[in-house]
Image (cartoon, rainbow, N blue to C red):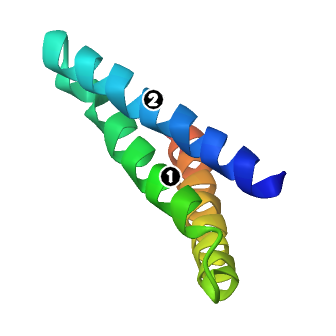
């Protein structure tokens, strides 16, 4: 059951890649970031069933947490800086 859900989620991520590629090619390149994230998430989802991937996943989650925390801190500094 869980493996099927992972496969379906990876297919959805593949659809995100296809749609964002079309949008990036036909309109603007600012949508290219969605394509890159879709490719990254698809690869991570397909690797999720492998042995030993949980350690890498936890390290990646910790790094993403600190990156988002840093972005929040920087955005509040920019928002509330004195003029």
Res 24 quadrant in image: top left
Which residue sits at x=57%, y=57%?
Answer: 45
Residue under pointer 2: 16
Q: How far from the left and from the top, in percent, is residue 40?
A: 42, 55
Of 21 and 27, nearer the camera is 21
The local secondary structure at tag 2 comes to helix
N-terminal-most mark, 2 or 1: 2
Residue 60 in the image: state x and y as whole percent: 58, 74
Is 23 above or below relative to 18?
above
The residue located at (55%, 46%) in the rendering is 75
The x, y position of residue 74, in whole percent, is: 53, 55
Residues under numbered marks 2 and 1 in contact, where contact means CB atoms less than 8 Å apart: yes
Q: What residue is drawn where x is 63% and y is 75%? A: 57
Q: Where is residue 11 in the image (x, y as percent from the top left)?
A: 53, 37
Give the residue drawn at x 62%, y 68%: 48
Q: Name the residue under label 1.
A: 41
């Amino acid at each position: 059951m869980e493996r099927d859900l992972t496969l379906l989620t990876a297919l959805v991520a593949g659809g995100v890649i296809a749609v964002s590629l079309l949008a990036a090619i036909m309109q603007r390149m600012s949508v290219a970031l969605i394509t890159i994230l879709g490719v990254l998430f698809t690869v991570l989802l397909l690797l999720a069933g492998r042995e030993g991937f949980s350690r890498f996943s936890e390290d990646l989650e910790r790094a993403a947490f600190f990156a988002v925390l840093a972005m929040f801190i920087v955005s509040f500094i920019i928002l509330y800086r004195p003029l």
